[in-house]
Image (cartoon, helix red, strand yellow):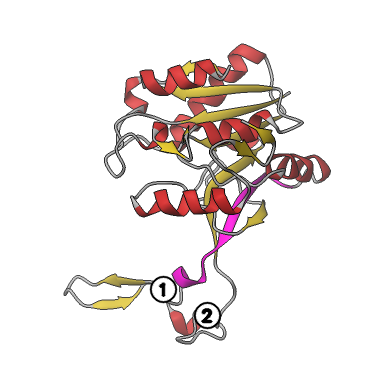
Amino acid sequence: MIAALLIGRGGSRGVPGKNTMQILGRPLMTYPIIAARHARQVDRLFLSTEDAEIAEIGGKAGLELIDRPAELATDSALVEDVVQHGYREIVKITGNLDLLVLLFCNSATIPVGMIDEGIDRLRADPSLDSAVSVSRYNEYSPVRAMRISPRGVLENYVDVSAIPGASCDRDSAADSWFCDCSVWVLRPRCVDPLSDSLPFRWTGRTIWPLRQEGGLDIDYPYGIAHTEGWLTANGFTEDTTPYGIG
């Protein structure tokens, strides 16, 4: 069996109410629900939250609710612990799980067919631990990354001289692909127990890239316009979706 787990909490400080804010006439969290509903291989949909409004929207959409403990609904709670808790609750309900599709309430940028693409990849190749959506953001390449030193001046975040071809040109080195938090297709062996592969311990070490353009979750206000632009470019309006009406 394959289950989708949608996670989201109330109390965001960066963008208050982001998970339920209206984007093109729908609550933001509706978009990952739509994608999961139209994935041909997802059998059941679950929602982990402590927030009443998020739970109400998910319940009306037919998701099975997982009550998130208070200690996992704080600013300091790690996503990896939320994922593991949700997975364990799903297993209690279903008995077993072949794959887990992890989705975020604040991430709407899911291309049509991407969830099934990730599932197909993992079914075809047992060596893969996960399949994860990524977007290319060369403007944030390690070549350009800086940090402020203890004495207050800028310094390279990494040893740029060790990166072949590095220069001031943002495209000079290999493309920089970032996990964009849109889709994560995971094997249970990576979630319980969690792997030791940082930064996303729920992905394991052998990760297949599900490539797209412009994927982004909303953690800062600029993400709102970015997400609306992505949705419009990918066939969403207030009245229709790439899947049809609604």
Residue 100 lies, in percent from the top left, at 64, 32
Could you classify mark 1 by the number of other residues whose Cα lies within 10 Å: few (under 14), some (14-19), or many (20 or more)? Answer: some
Residue 192 lies, in percent from the top left, at 57, 31
The N terminus: image quadrant: top right
| Residue corresponding to mark 2 | 163
Q: Residue 133 in magenta? A: yes
Q: Amino acid at mark 2?
A: Ile
Vertical comparison of 167 with 2: above or below: below
Residue at the (74%, 39%) spot, across then down:
116
Vertical comparison of 129 with 86: above or below: below
Vertical comparison of 27 with 230: above or below: above
* Residue 193 appears in view: no
Secondary structure under tag 1 reads loop
The C terminus: image quadrant: top right
| Residue corresponding to mark 1 | 158
Foreground pick, 54 / 170: 54
Judge left or right: residue 148 versus residue 57.
left
Q: Residue 124 in magenta? A: no
Residue at the (76%, 31%) spot, across then down:
40
Judge left or right: residue 91 versus residue 201.
right
Residue 229 lies, in percent from the top left, at 50, 54
* Residue 83 appears in view: yes
Judge left or right: residue 151 versus residue 154.
left
Picture disc at residue 74: none
Marks 1 and 2 close (CB-CB < 8 Å)? yes
Residue at the (34%, 29%) spot, across then down:
10
Could you classify mark 2 by the number of other residues whose Cα lies within 10 Å: few (under 14), some (14-19), or many (20 or more)? Answer: some
Magenta part of the chain: 128-141
Residue 204 picture quarter = top right
Q: Amino acid at mark 1?
A: Val
Tally of numbered tags: 2
Secondary structure under tag 2 reads loop
